[in-house]
Amino acid sequence: MKPNKSYPITQWAEDDRPREKLLLKGKGTLSDAELIAILLRSGNVEDSAVDLAKKILNKANNNLIELSKFRPIDLFAFNGIGEAKALSIIAALELGKRRRGAEVLKKEKIGSSKDGYDYFVSIMEDSKYENFWILLLNTANKILKHVQISEGGVSGTIADPKKIFNIAIEHGSSGIILCHNHPSGNIKPSEADIKLTKKIIEGGRLLDINVLDHIIIGEETYFSFADENMM
């Protein structure tokens, strides 16, 4: 029997059921909708769990990052989604986001701009406002701590170099990585970004603190000052 919205998943052919498919063929064979259907466990009178999952994904432009920005109230709008199902989806996506950061933490060392991006994207990708953070490193580029410097609006935030270096000195940091997000998705650095980066680099030289990179996070991509030889 082929999947049809008029039949519950329990009446589908075994190979077409998400949970059975995962067990038989592995997690990589499941679509995003099928994975979400496993979280939902059931649909509603009109839709199977998979069809309901497809509707939810469609509302998020079929993008899991967009879906991760949904609040419980956004999910309640779908017939068949109550508190338990909404929170299951939100919790699963949050775990996925934290996993990215955990992979970098396991390495303990930042060896490239991609490592820096992977570390920070789990912190900032859902933010609707521009945030500025720093990552503190020791002489071997091992992670000491990350610290938020400021939070602004949708188009800008202020980072005080004095605050940045006070924090770096307080934690005995030998190097720092700067990072902020552009909620617009445009990763091109502004003139203000470029001037601030140069100012912080100059201050770091005076204090013998190496400013290794400045990373701008956009929608599933990033800009690295170091990779573009702008440090």
Image: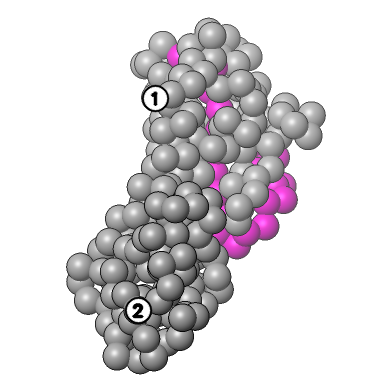
In this rendered view, identify the residue nearer to me: 182 or 80: 80
Q: Which residues are magenta?
A: 173-196
Residue 145 - label: 1
Mark 2 is surrounded, within 10 Å at the Cα level, by few (under 14), some (14 to 19) or many (20 or more) other residues, namely: few
Mark 1 is surrounded, within 10 Å at the Cα level, by few (under 14), some (14 to 19) or many (20 or more) other residues, namely: some
Magenta residue check for 195: yes
Helix, strand or loop at label 1? It is strand
**Spatial CA span between label 1 and label 2:** 51 Å
Q: Amino acid at mark 1?
A: Lys
Residue positioned 53% across, 8% down in the render: 139
Q: Amino acid at mark 2?
A: Gln
Give above or below for 112 relative to 72: above
Where in the figure is residue 61, as x and y percent of width and height?
56, 73
The quadrant of the rendering that contains the C terminus is top right
Give above or below for 184 relative to 105: below
Q: Is residue 224 left or right of residue 3?
A: right
In this rendered view, identify the residue nearer to me: 226 or 56: 56
Where in the figure is residue 110, as x and y percent of width and height?
56, 22
Quarter location, residue 228: top right
Residue positioned 39% across, 91% down in the render: 6
Where in the figure is residue 179, as x and y percent of width and height?
55, 38
